[in-house]
Amino acid sequence: MSTRGRVIIQVNDLHHTYLSGTPLEVKALKGVTMEVYEGEVVGIIGRTGAGKSTIVQHFNGLIRKRERGRVVVDGHDMADPSLDVRAVRQKVGLVFQHPEQQLFERLVGDDIAFGPKKMGLPPEVRRERVRWAMEMVGLDFETFKDRFTFSLSGGEMRKVAIAGVLALQPKVLILDESTTGIDPRGRKELLSRMLNLNREHGVTLVFVSSNMEEVAGVADRIYVIDNGRAVMHGTTREIFGQPEALRRYGLGVPHVSAVAHRLSQDGIPVPRVPLTVAEAEEDIWKILNS
Amino acid sequence: MENFEFLRNVTIGQYFQGDSIIHRLDPRAKITVLLILVAVNSFILSFTGNVLLLSLCIALVLLSGISFAFMLSGIKPALPLIAIFALMQLFFYGDAYPPYGMESITYWRWGMMSITNGSIQLVVVTLMRFLEIFFLVSLLTSTTTTTNIAYAIESMLEPFQRLRLPAQEISLIGTIALRFVPIFAEQMEIIMKAQASRGADFGEGGVFQFVKRTRQMVTLIVPLFVDAFRRAEDLILAMDARCYTGGRGRTKIVRFHMGRMDYLFIALTAVFGVLIMVFRDHFPV
């Protein structure tokens, strides 16, 4: 599981206020401290409006102005005014919720090539990047590169949009609720492809989600965000072993973890907190056999 | 440094909850007052008249309890355009507008360009008139919800329904247009962030590199249009699903009643307007 590499994103006591100085100001972050290690999968969970998106938008410099706190991404202090933000954005790719809404080119290949083109890469390299990115999200290069963007299905459009970010070959990929609104099978496929990206290509994943099942399946470590603060953090098993604490922050645990918790409350010794159905099945067989 | 907070710049059309006298006025009264003052605005060309009207507008803003500085910040995006217009008026309108209430003096002349006290007055007065309208419209939208504005317009257009004027539809179109301004501002912010995340550079290239800047806009405008059409279709479906069949025979859950305060406001504004109109030819400057 998580082999702790070096810290790639370090956040210290981060504060942020939206529309500060206007009657509409909202204090979104009130002192968040967290770090992301190279090569791991970090889950960020919390209820709507907790500040999850605001945090990850600091990771690639979409939000830089802030009153207090420090964000260091891959050795770059994000507050440094001479920093080349575009270089950081190539290292840290951010995929938003409903990313298919950002497509604008007529042809799929051109849209995915937008990032590499902006980086000033030569056409052959661009082509290779597009091919690689499409392969990573599971779109066949030859079949899809000349298709019309707006004639694709919703799921395919989303894959194209994610490929558009992957074509930058980022070290860190942030998925901000990027799997909501697609069918369960497509979601599962996308998740396993993203995990593959992490395992095979060493891309660090930051996974923002409000779907506990999904997070449990992929994350090594989890941060719980509530009301602008990181209120809990630990390995996925540690976090989902505390359903009462999570409930306080308006969150649940995966069904299998909840079942295991109930069993242990009834005095049945459960060896660990299961995170997936397969793990739970294994554990239950163990209990039944003992 | 880029700033993606568009809502900061959209002050017109933004409603702020409050409990001031202005908030509590009947929306029809507010619209009537607005219409009277806009009419007055379009008739006065003198310094004195505009100082009076601008003071009234500022007083109304203060009365509403809405942050004055915030309201002013809404002009910021329009400043370059205002500056260009002001310069053109200053240099090219010198001879077209004799000054109001003063002897004409020419300060500077070069070919077809000139600066006279007439053109200076024109620039200052235009700016004041712009501010007056801006304050009045911002004030209406920031103290009245769009729903209430729509109801008010509908109810004020009702008498014309006999002439087959689709009052309800007109107010509905207006509401939808206003309602979508903040939505599109927000959507634009998201799309801009998404494009920046994959390498787009906004704000790069000087103000006068039109081609470069227009190119950058394509990555925003295409997705924004796609989104607008999608939202429009969703809206049609939602209206259909709730059996919207047009305004005919529709009843309302909210009914407004004009109170004493409302009539008082309209009466005071009307008196102010009449006085200004009567004395407009007697102001010193």
Image: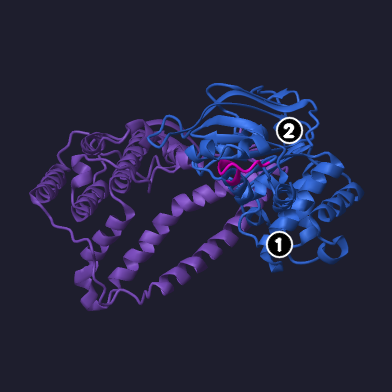
Chain colours: A blue, B purple
Please say if A254 is above or below B241.
above
Which chain does tag 2 point to?
A
**Which x, y percent locates residue B202?**
65, 41
**Residue extending furthest front?**
A290
Q: CA distance from mark 2 to mark 1?
A: 33 Å
Res. B88 in view: no
Quadrant where the N terminus of chain A lies?
A: top right
Image point (38%, 72%), residue name: B242
Q: Is A267 in the magenta? A: yes
Would you identify the image quadrant in which residue B249 lies?
bottom left
Q: Alpha-carbon neighbours of circle 2 within 10 Å: few (<14), some, or many (≥20)?
A: many
Front position in the image: A44 or A66: A44
**Which x, y percent locates residue A252?**
54, 45
Q: Which residue is mark 1?
A: A185
**Nearest to viewer (mark 2 / mark 1):** 1
Image point (64%, 23%), residue name: A79
Q: Alpha-carbon neighbours of circle 1 within 10 Å: few (<14), some, or many (≥20)?
A: few
Magenta region: A263-270
Q: In the rendered structure, find residue A88 and report the number of the disc placed on it.
A: 2
Res. A289 in view: yes
Q: Which mark sits nearer the N-terminus, 2 or 1? A: 2
Q: Is residue A106 left or right of residue B182?
A: right
Would you identify the image quadrant in which residue A185 lies?
bottom right
Could you say whether the residue bearing mark 2 is in a helix, strand or loop?
Answer: helix
Q: In the rendered structure, find residue A110 and report the number of the disc placed on it.
A: none
Please say if B131 is above or below B178.
above
Front position in the image: A183 or A3: A3
Q: Is B100 in the magenta? A: no
Could you say whether the residue bearing mark 1 is in a helix, strand or loop?
Answer: helix
Query: Which residue type does callout 2 highlight?
Result: Val
